[in-house]
Amino acid sequence: MSIIAAYYYSKGKRVREIALDERVELNEDRSGFCWIALSEPSDDELSAIQATYNLHPLAIDNAMHPLCPPKLEVYNDELYIVAQTAELVGDRIVYGKMAI
């Protein structure tokens, strides 16, 4: 796995780096969030993040399947978004997936 980013943001500004197993509590105004970007995480790594952040099992299941289509799902009080990404690399378009 490659960790691309793991940061805590508050009021739109990056505050600090976080560890993948560190659970950060929201501030009172709920303007804070953790951004964790991973490239090709293993099942065990996704399970560990699920346990740390108490993520819905279906969100983790979708993240484990690379062919999951773009979509928006609501799991209890969580939004889960799968977006298709595109990047121009040289003269080719390379497609990817981002799960939020």
Image (tube, grey):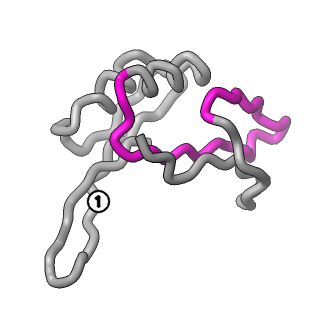
Give amino acid for label 1.
Thr
Residue at image location 46% in from the left, 34% down from the top: 79
In the image, 18: left or right of 44?
Answer: right
Name the residue at the front extreme.
1
Q: Position of residue 39 (x, y in %)?
A: 38, 46
Above/below status of 60 relative to 88: above
Q: Nearer the viewer, residue 65 or 59?
A: 65
Dot 1 falls on a residue whose secondary structure is strand
* Category of crowding for the residue at label 1, using alpha-carbon neighbours closer than 10 angstroms: few (below 14), some (14–19), many (at least 20): few
Residue under label 1, please give it.
85
Q: Position of residue 23 (x, y in %)?
A: 70, 27
Above/below status of 19 relative to 88: above
Q: Position of residue 99 (x, y in %)?
A: 38, 42
Name the residue at the bottom extreme.
91
Queried whether the magenta region covers residue 31, the answer comes back as: yes
Q: Position of residue 53 (x, y in %)?
A: 59, 24
Which quadrant would residue 11 be assigned to in this image?
bottom right
- Magenta part, dominant SS: loop
Above/below status of 55 relative to 28: above
In the image, 18: left or right of 76?
Answer: right
The segment highlighted magenta reads: 20-43
Above/below status of 74 relative to 17: above
In the image, 74: left or right of 25?
Answer: left
Queried whether the magenta region covers residue 19, the answer comes back as: no
Residue at image location 56% in from the left, 52% down from the top: 5
Name the quarter where the N terminus is drawn.
top left
In the image, 17: left or right of 4?
Answer: right
Residue at image location 41% in from the left, 35% down from the top: 80
